[in-house]
Amino acid sequence: MMPLRTMLFAPGDHARKVAKVFDVGADAVILDLEDAVAEAEKPATRSVVVEALKRPRRCYGYVRVNGMETHHCFGDLKEVVGPWLDGVILPKAESADQIKTADWLITQLEREKNLPAGNIDLIPIIETAKGHRAIGSIVSASRRLQRVAFGAGDYTLDLGIAWSLRETELESVRAACVMESRAAGIEPPIDTVFIHLNETQAFVASVERARDLGFQGKLCIHPDQVNAANAAFTPDKEAVAYARRVVEAFQAAEAAGSASIQVNGYFIDYPIYEKAKRTLDIAEAIANIT
């Protein structure tokens, strides 16, 4: 498991921001070649992004390429794929065929550049009605795909939905991302960005809602969002201690022939035990990257 609590976007053509973004504390940085870069500047920005990824860093380095429907996508992949790249973010994913094509292209570039096969991660963003409808086939389209992300900006634009601070209008697509990911046996998804930069409490509520719905992390668009999101998606000391008590007590009871016990007044059976183990696994994985 590779925990991604926070994935911080930075415009690929903004040298000053790119130089600083890797030290903010996000689990991954996404250098953007899509929405944050003007049309005329996209080809020239590819080399800027590659040079940034070659520098020493303590977090994962991803690139959001332009969508498969654009004439920029292949050129983006051809230039950014290399030993410096941890993963590709594919925007506006709408079909399994798009995922298979992107996977095939990355595979050929890995071979051409003598890279280990399959090491480059592929994260599609679900951000249209077609993408929402096709989530089930998208998450099963490639072994390279280990998680998906949700993007509310383009999603609400596509459907003509008002994007509110409470985000109740996003419940159905968020639930679909989580459910289809689980059904496909891949990791939990990454939640959408939050664009109201001065609404700190609303941002925390958005992060906590996503966590409680089953997401593993959050797309971020400002460094100030990173610490709060990291904290929300990291099991706190009390949660870890309780999970450890549950696991130890249940394992002892199971060895003695019982599969249902009480811990601190709570009924514990196999589902609760498995959930506690998952908490410990997440905490351990996070500890290994921090």
Image (cartoon, rainbow, N blue to C red):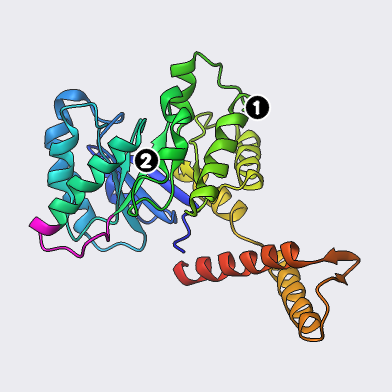
Measured from the top left, where is residue 277 in percent x and y? Answer: 65, 69
Give the residue at the far left of this rendering: 112
Residue 170, quarter of picture:
top right
Residue indicated by mark 2 = 124
Front residue of 96 and 265: 96
Measured from the top left, where is residue 268 in percent x and y? Answer: 82, 67
Q: Residue at x 16, y 57 (%)?
A: 110
- State whether residue 150 appears in this view: no
Asked whether 85 falls inside the magenta stretch, the response is no
At mark 1, the secondary structure is helix
Would you say 195 lies left or right of 97 here?
right
Task: Characterize the local packing of mark 2: few (<14), some (14-19) or many (20 or more) Cα atoms within 10 angstroms.
Answer: many
Measured from the top left, where is residue 58 in percent x and y? Answer: 35, 63
Asked whether 119 falls inside the magenta stretch, the response is yes
Residue indicated by mark 1 = 168
Measured from the top left, where is residue 206 in percent x and y? Answer: 61, 37
Front residue of 71 and 260: 260
Front residue of 154 and 249: 249
Q: Residue at x 45, y 23 (%)?
A: 129
Please give the range of residues in magenta.
Answer: 111-120
Q: Residue at x 22, y 59 (%)?
A: 55
Q: Is residue 109 above or below residue 36?
A: below
Magenta residues: mostly which secondary structure?
A: loop
At mark 2, the secondary structure is strand
